[in-house]
Amino acid sequence: MSIRRAENRDIGRLIDLLHQVLEVHASGRGDLFQSGNTKYSETELSSMITDENTPIFVLEDETGTVQGYAMCQIEDLNNSNMVKHRNFYIDDICVDEACRRKHYGNRLYAFAKEYARSIGAYHITLSVWNCNPGAEAFYESLGMKPMKTVMEEIL
């Protein structure tokens, strides 16, 4: 098992995994997520792969097959009402559903955390949908805590 930066040759597999993530969200919030789509297109992924501010890390198993990813964003925040700091935002972590419970997600998170430290990030943030309690429990098991709550009223 190894973790590395994504390359263009990984895009097809990233699309496959993005479909898995979307289906989890579509089953929990079909009013917001359209089944059969992905969050990013091949073109968008290609652009992200070459952008230093949107690193994508992939986890390969012993056969060299990508079994998971962590899509990240580096944000330098300098708002007038906040202390200037660097945020390392995890946009998405996914492990292939056939490979779950092998601690691949833990390894991806640990790798991303070390990378965030190496670039001087103050903290790691991410969003998790309430319709995905498994993800909430996973992130809490890593030591993450809620930072803020987004509320909604469906009209």
Image: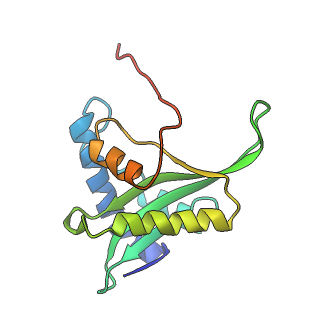
Residue shown at the point (25%, 46%) measured from the top left: 24
The scheme the figure's colours follow is rainbow
Q: Is residue 148 left or right of residue 1?
A: right
Q: Position of residue 60 (x, y in %)?
A: 36, 78
Residue shown at the point (40%, 57%) measured from the top left: 93
Q: Quadrant of the C terminus?
A: top left
Q: Is residue 139 left or right of residue 29?
A: right
Numbered marks: total = 0
Q: Quadrant of the N terminus?
A: bottom left
Q: Is residue 116 above or below residue 147?
A: below
Q: Is residue 132 above or below residue 119?
A: above
Residue shown at the point (24%, 33%) measured from the top left: 30
Residue shown at the point (32%, 68%) measured from the top left: 103
Name the residue at the right extreme.
80
Q: Position of residue 36 (x, y in %)?
A: 24, 48
Q: Is residue 27 left or right of residue 58?
A: left
Q: Position of residue 89 (x, y in %)?
A: 56, 51
Q: Position of residue 147 (x, y in %)?
A: 53, 37
Nearest the viewer among 132 and 13 is: 132
Quadrant of res 47: bottom right
Q: Is residue 34 above or below residue 86?
A: above
Q: Is residue 93 visible?
A: yes
Q: Is residue 37 visible?
A: no
